[in-house]
Amino acid sequence: MSNIQLIIEERAADIGNFLVGRLLPFREKRMVGPFIFIDHMGPAKMSERENLDVQPHPHIGLSTLTFLFEGAIMHRDSIGNEIEIKPGEVNWMTAGKGIVHSERTPEYLRHSEKHMHGLQIWVALPKELENMEPNFAHVDKDHIPYWMDGDVSYQLIAGEAFGRRSPVPVYSKLYMLEIKSSTRQTINIGHKLYGESGLYILEGSVENEGNRYDPKQILVAKESTLCSFTMEANTTVYLFGGEPLPEQRFIDWNFVSSSKETLATARQNWIDQKFPKIKGDDIEFVPYPTRIKP
C-alpha cells in the first residue's frame, strides 16, 4: 500500500499585483504539522515597469518564513526591521500578538528587468505563544546547515532533522529540508523525520511505488518514518512537517489563531487601523477584504 495519503496541486491565487501558486491550506488538509500556509511565488520575469509591491498588512498567531530561489525582496516591519531578502537566506518573522510588514522590490531593481521565485510559508504558533511579543530573525545562506551524501545535497532550512538543527528560532518541533540530486537516487528517510510530513516538488520528478509525480505538487505522507522515494536526475524537493499542534487553528485573512474571538478582534483592530505602523512605509496599506473565501 502506498505511503502517500494525499496529493495537493498548486492553485492560482492573487496577492495584489502578483500571482502565486497556493498549496496550503487545502480543503482536505488544512495543515501539515504546524505548517498552515504555503505559497509558491513564480518563477516570474518582471519588466522594468513591473515590481512586487505587497503593501503593509498585518499578521497574528504565526511565524512567516520567506525563502527565495531567485530575485530580491525588501522586507520592512513595524518593529523596525528593514532588510533585503536574497536567494538562499531565511527571513523568519514571528507575529505573535501582532505585527505589520511590507514586501517590495528593492529600489535599485525597480527600473530594470528582474526575476522572482520562492516560497512564502506560515507556521502556526503553539497556543501558549500566540500572544507573544513579535520578533524577527534573518539567517544568512552560509549559516544554514548543508551536507552532501553522494550526489545528493541537503539543506536544513528550519527546525531539527537528521541529527542537525537550523539556527532559525522556531517555536515547535518541525523541519523544512531542501534535497537536491544531480543523478537518479532513492532516498530512504527512515526514522530521521517525525510527526506529519509533506514533500513539495520544485523541479524534476519523483517516483514512489511505480507512480511518477511532477512539479507543483505536495505529496502528504501517511507515516513520516516510512518516507522513501526516488528522485530523477536534476530534481529539487522540499520536505516539511513536524509535530501537529493539539488544537485546531482558524484562519481569517492574514490572521491565525486557536480562538475565533481573537481573530474577530484582530480583524476589527486592522479595520480601525489600531495596529502599529511601519516607519518609512506608513502611507499605503492593504485593506481588510470585503469578502473572504473559506
Image (cartoon, grey):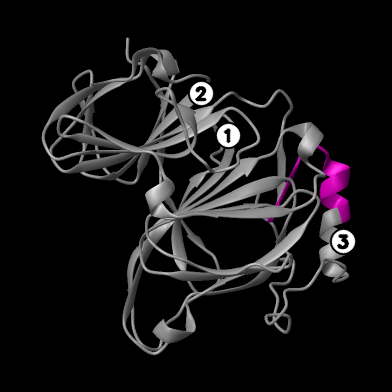
The magenta segment:
253-265
Q: Nearer the viewer, residue 139 or 60?
A: 139
Describe the element under mark 3 as helix, strand or loop: helix
Q: Which residue is mark 3?
A: 268
Check the image and report above or below for 170 versus 263: above
Q: Is residue 135 left or right of residue 165?
A: right
Alpha carbon of mark 2 to alpha carbon of mark 3: how far?
34 Å
Question: Which numbered disc, 2 or 1, marks the residue closer to the eye?
Answer: 2
Q: Which residue is mark 2?
A: 196
Q: Using the rendered image of the protein, determine whether residue 160 is visible from the camera's viewpoint.
A: yes
Describe the element under mark 1 as helix, strand or loop: loop
Give the mark, 1 or 3, whose residue is nearer the N terminus: 1
Residue 31 image label: 1
The amino acid beneath tag 2 is Glu
Alpha carbon of mark 1 to alpha carbon of mark 3: how far?
26 Å
Which quadrant of the structure image shows residue 192? Answer: top left
